[in-house]
Amino acid sequence: MKIFKNVDPTKDPILKSIVFLSIPMMVEMLTQNLFNLVDMYFVSKISYLAIGALVSSSIVLMVIFSSFIGLSTATGMYVASCLGGKKFSQARFYYSNAFTLVLIFSLLFSAVLYLFLNGILNLLGLRGLTRIFAYQYLSVAVLGLIFNFLFTLNNSVLRSNALPSLVVRVMVLTNILNAIFDPFFMFYLKLGIRGAALSTIMSVLIGICLQVIFLHNNGYYFRFLIRERVVSRLLSKGVFASLHLFFRIVSMLVLIRLVSGFSQVALSAYSIVIRIYQVLLFLVFGLANTSFVVVGQNYGAKLIDRLKEGAFWVLALGFFFIGALDVLIYALRDPILAIFVRDPMVKKIAFRLMFFYFVSYPFVVLATISARSSMALHDTKRPSLINLFNLWFFMLPLAYVLSKYYGLNGIWFSIALSNFTSFLANIVLLLFNLKRVENEVVRI
């Protein structure tokens, strides 16, 4: 049986479509996470302070990236709907407009990030060697934003075409190249943490070349094209999808500020645990992307029963599968932490934090898949508002207050509790959206 088989989510049995789409999508996300883990492994050879700098820098880049991800999400949303309705030329038209916007946005964001780099690092509260390492990394990474943006857009379009197996091939290639380039640039050429940033740029650039081949074979091509009607649709839906991620990433920066206020050791522990649990998070993203494609294509085909069945099957599979892995990671926390850290204080703080992640991560699974399914139903506004209120008006104020009385444990508890409240809000929203699209079809 070929596990990377191409399927048609509007015709094939729902469970079969989910299985054959979710496996390569999760493999894709795992390989993407390996990218980060490989970087962290080699950076840890420099200093444990360099780990905090790498993760802090990555989050800064993710803030910039969040401003673009909405465009990628909106493009994938419209492409999936068009393909479900068999409007193939229209799907390619959306891609051409999105490609042009990517070029414009990437140049703008690169210039802004480079000009305000010192100010951004000051806001994060990074000090000493951690700050020096972060500046070195970001000063190179900013040059590769255009490639990261194009890479993500192309992957989104390939996924929406129900071609995740091609995305896996690209991700495997870039991971192999990154694992080779990291030690070469960092240690052989003696570029240090700058080498990690350069390695990522080179790997992604070569990956884009492979994406171009796959897209061309499926009728897509790079074309400079701007049409006001299409751009307006992409931006109107994309802005809220961007805000959805933006609110989360910026909240992480605030948490970094809170944690670093205790010590740089605490920041390193927090950074390591984030990276470890990104293994699960990226698997969750793979399942959420599966729901996005299945729900999106069936929405375009007006097959309401199929999209409802697909959404709930992905939720169930995600809860039990990721939940089992969550238990496994917590049970093996000691040997896992030993890979990345030797300092006893860093390890002690990380141990405690992992408990809070362990008890709340099943709710992260359900919240993420529910939000992504709502976006596939062309609702990008409400999931972003949920993130805004849950993170900025609940989690962060609670973390600040509890940190005054309970220290780091107060921050960890606030994160866990907000994961639960996010689940409640997003599952209710998904039920609302499913009822909404059902009424739309009835009216038609």
Image (cartoon, helix red, strand yellow):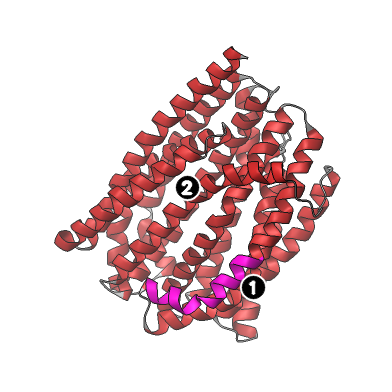
* Residue 303, quarter of picture: top right
Looking at the image, tell me whether mark 1 or mark 2 is earlier in sequence order.
1
At horizontal 53% and vertical 65% (from top left) the residue drawn is 61
- Secondary element under disc 1, as helix, strand or loop, is helix
Count the marks: how many? 2
In the figure, 425 relative to 26: above or below?
above
Q: Closest to the observer: 280 or 309? A: 309
At horizontal 80% and vertical 49% (from top left) the residue drawn is 214
Number of residues whose C-alpha sits closer than 10 Å to that of mark 2, classed few (under 14), some (14–19) or many (20 or more): many
Q: Residue furthest front?
A: 228
Viewer can see residue 305: yes
Residue highlighted by disc 1: 143
Q: Position of residue 218 (x, y in %)?
A: 82, 42
Q: Amino acid at mark 2?
A: His
Viewer can see residue 7: no
Quarter occupied by the C terminus: top right
Q: Position of residue 48 (x, y in %)?
A: 41, 76
Q: Closest to the observer: 382 or 424? A: 382
Find the magenta span and give its range: 107-123
Q: Amino acid at mark 1?
A: Leu
Q: Is residue 36 magenta?
A: no
Number of residues whose C-alpha sits closer than 10 Å to that of mark 1, classed few (under 14), some (14–19) or many (20 or more): some
Quarter occupied by the N terminus: top right
Residue highlighted by disc 2: 244
